[in-house]
Amino acid sequence: MNNQDYTAKEAMKILGKTQATFYREVKAGLIPHKGKRPNMRFPKEAIDVLADLGPIEEEDHKLSVTPITIADLWEAKEISTSPYGEENDVPFKTVMEWKKVNNEMGISLKENNKLVGWTTFLPLDEKIAIALITDQMKEKDIAPRFIKKWIDNKISVYIPVIEVVPSGNKYTDIKRGTFLLRKTIKWAVILSIQYDIKNWYAIGATEDGQAILEALGFTKIHETEDGKEKGYVIETITKPVKLISRTVREIQKSENLPLPEHITK
């Protein structure tokens, strides 16, 4: 061992980690190293910096986003906290019929492999998207023939839901919601670059949801008579970095705008 590196035992002691945690973080790429077990070496400069800065918040490493699976969709249906009543629930059979047309319409947020949130994008004809946000049509009435493939021309995307499962801890919910929102925006940006998306539609069913949509740059084009729900539209996203930064900054600096269980309807 040269004087530029620590042994695993030395690095563990300096970082104050158990052997199991230490090697788990090594595998996850959180601790720089050279070589392979049992001859791993750990650069002194890097280990000393990590020890000096203290631990990085583990939640950042536990959260991940993956394409939504059939099992995720069923679990989401089982644990969803939707306050909108059974008349607005979409039958699982309908969701599966949509998925047969387009298998890439959702992402799952997981924490330690447990489902804690999800986002769904529905690519539709613009007339159907407008009917949805003006309350002329319910999501459960979207027939499979209305679902578009991403390679189709002049798609309008309707956002049915961006949801995090409430944990009972405000900080945890904000952390999860901000993470999911970042990933959702990035996914929208990638889709906008790859495909012929004309615009995006969403319903703000709560004050929090409306505030977030407006922070994202959506424009209100419809409002129910009681003012509780508002329909929004935005053109294809063209400035992703500024959009993400501005939105997350708005969320994080506002003490009165915790990420809600439902960001949109």
Image (spheres, rainbow, N blue to C red):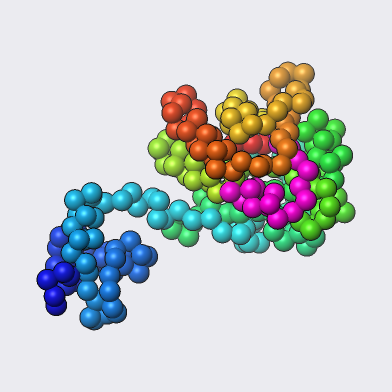
Residue 100 higher or lower than 175, as above or below = below
**Relative height, residue 112 to residue 146 (above, below):** below
Residue 151 on image: x %, y %: 79, 58
Pick the residue in front: 126 or 131: 126
The image quadrant that residue 252 belongs to is top left
User: With 208 as the anchor, is 52 left or right in this view?
Assistant: left
Name the quadrant containing residue 219. top right
Q: Residue at x 57, y 54 (%)?
A: 108
Looking at the picture, tell me which residue is in the foreground, 132 or 254: 254
State the residue lying farthest toward the left.
Answer: 3
User: Which is nearer the eye, 150 or 118?
Assistant: 150
In-front residue for pair 214/83: 214
Q: Position of residue 85 (x, y in %)?
A: 69, 36
Count of residue discs: 0
Which residue is drawn at the image coordinates 49% and 41% (left, top)? Answer: 178
Q: Could you tell whether 265 is left or right of 109 in the image?
A: right
Q: Which range of residues does the magenta coloring cover?
A: 186-203
Residue at 69% x, 49% y is 192
Q: Position of residue 45 (x, y in %)?
A: 20, 61
In this view of the protein, can residue 94 be seen by the observer? no
Query: In the figure, is residue 233 to the left or right of 74?
Result: right
Specify whether residue 217 is in view: yes
Asked if the magenta segment contains residue 199, the reply would be yes
Q: Is residue 210 above or below residue 57?
A: above
Q: Quadrant of the C terminus?
A: top right
Q: Position of residue 138 (x, y in %)?
A: 80, 39
At x 22% / y 74%, what residue is drawn? 41
Residue 188: say if magenta: yes
| Location of the N terminus (image quadrant) | bottom left
